[in-house]
Amino acid sequence: MRLDESSLHKTLQTHQLDVANQHMRDLFAADPERAERYTLDAAGLTLDYSKNRINDKTLELLLRLAKEAKLGDRIEALFSGEAVNHTEQRPALHTALRARHQVELIVEGHNILGEVRETLSRMRKWVRAIHTGELRGYSNKPIDTLVSIGIGGSFLGPKTVSTALQTQAKDGLNCHYVANIDGNDLALVLEQIDPETTVFLIQSKSFTTLETLENAKAAKRWQQAQGVPESAFAKHWIAVSANVAAAEAFGIDKHHVFPMWDWVGGRYSLWSAIGLPIAFMVGMDHFEALLDGAHAMDEHFRHAPFEKNMPVLLALLGVWYGNYFGAQSHAVLPYDELMRHLPEHLQQLDMESNGKSVDREGRPLSYPSGPVIWGGPGSNGQHAYHQLLHQGTQLIPADFIMPLRHHHGLESHHRYLFSNCLSQSQALMQGKTYAEALRELKATGMAEAQAAQLAPHKVIAGNKPSNTILMEQVSPASLGALIALYEHKVFAQGVLWNVNSFDQWGVELGKALSKELFEVLEGTRDAAAMDSSTRSLLSRYPL
Ligand code: F6P
């Protein structure tokens, strides 16, 4: 069902007109229980969604929308391995990667959980062999460095999680990530590593991604230039891919290739062997605790009633602002330096999933779908872009995310951070009226006329919506639950917009055109048929 075909669409449009005239200040004043009624605990997370432009009627209508979209059936289809990615005839079974207690899940005639568990066991064996020094480099030195070469989902998830869990990392280990075809990315890493103690990991589901293959080839050339004998290659290279043949053709011993599967999307793959950098850094026990956290959120998403379902509520609130308030972006603001890369991972997760303009039947959408996801760590954002959030003309819903406990021992810092996190959502909600601004200015002794002139510039409209997500601390379990929360929010929104959240045809054109332009630079293709801008810009390249 398309959103504009829902019997609720017009009702929601009309309801928005009512809600638009309500200020959250008044909603809180009218209901002292508002925060308690609009707060939910699940899988170790707490969601306070009371600072949203909603009332009970809003939630009733949105929940009916979810039911009319048969979201419950679609959730079951997702978990049971139906080909929900219909344009590629594939399931999307990232949940199977963390189906910790399930015995059987048949896909294309075989039980995929066997392969999942066998891969986890291989990961555990490899990580233990590295950590104990059983696996060594060609000069018999222990391995202390991993260079993960991959991009998109083969990079962002592992980097986000390994950064967030760095306080739990095993001493003496380093993990570097190389993603960009920009030579700086690889060069800066190669300057820092010792070829005798470094393993390179090629992370690529397709094993055809240009950036990844070019970086891997360059790293191999560097190794050889460093005097690593060809015969030692096998000791210093492993891969994760669904294309084992291509990995072997590159020179990776097939016993050093960890499998990836077609039924896992790249942006949903950190739970697979693509998560090896995480396991390398923090060990398999923590990696499996990450899986357990995600599984807890899976169970919640699959079984909680929608009115108490965290991913469903976040999804519905996103639709409420995107499709009825005209919001075009959504800010993710982790108040925690360890989670600083979370917005980058969620950008791919959300924008590559729901950045679509046709529905599942290929019909152009007549309504907005996925938003622009952006953000960064607090409190830094307050000194960069929060001005626009507070006094800009756009409505930008924000998610504030913060752990209650810290690992750093600087208690007063954590209290300042927590105060800032809460004050931002409070200021966004309540704002500052003209009368309050004028009174404040006059209280400073400013003349009436001057205060009246300045006051409009200090008015803050407020009524800017936000969610606050709290966790006990940044741990494998809470991080797993948090990322799974967003995976399921994205999926649920895809259902509400009736789009396929699991393909990404939009990235193919750029790749094809880039190949042609590279050939022009190489002198093997003529640019005459290209547009004048491209030709003019090409002509400026210093060949
Ligand atoms: O951007 C397109 C994409 O296919 C992403 O979906 C994927 O995560 C990334 O490129 C890397 O793909 P691969 O893991 O196949 O190298």
Image (cartoon, rainbow, N blue to C red):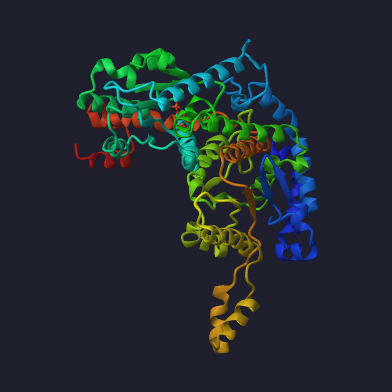
Q: Can I make out residue 203 in this image?
A: no
**Of residues 297 and 330, which is closer to you in this image?**
297
Q: Quadrant of residue 114?
A: top right
- Residue name at image x 64 percent, y 28 percent: 361
> From what the image shows, is residue 53 above or below residue 361?
below
In the picture as drawn, the residue positioned furthest to the top comes out as 109
Q: Which of the 4 quarters of the picture holds residue 522?
A: top left
From the top left corner, tell me how far across and down residue 513 is, in percent. Answer: 37, 31
Residue 47 visible in the shown view: yes
The quadrant in which residue 24 appears is: bottom right
Q: Front-most of 117 and 59?
A: 117
Residue at 54 percent across and 74 percent down: it is 457
Q: Where is the N terminus found, in terms of image quarters?
A: top right
- Between 198 and 396, the one lying in front of the other is 198
Q: Residue at x 70, y 30 (%)?
A: 75
Choose between 272 and 292: the one closer to the eye.
292
Q: Horizontally, is 190 left or right of 259 in the view? A: left
Residue at 27% across, 42% down:
536
Q: Is residue 447 above or below residue 109?
A: below
Residue 65, percent from left and from top:
76, 40
Q: Quadrant of the C terminus?
A: top left
Indicate the position of residue 309 as horizontal and vertical percent values. 73, 40
Left or right side of 396 for 305: right
Q: Is residue 58 above or below residue 95?
A: below
Relative to residue 118, is residue 518 drawn left or right?
A: left
Number of marks in the image? 0
Q: Position of residue 525 (x, y in %)?
A: 26, 27
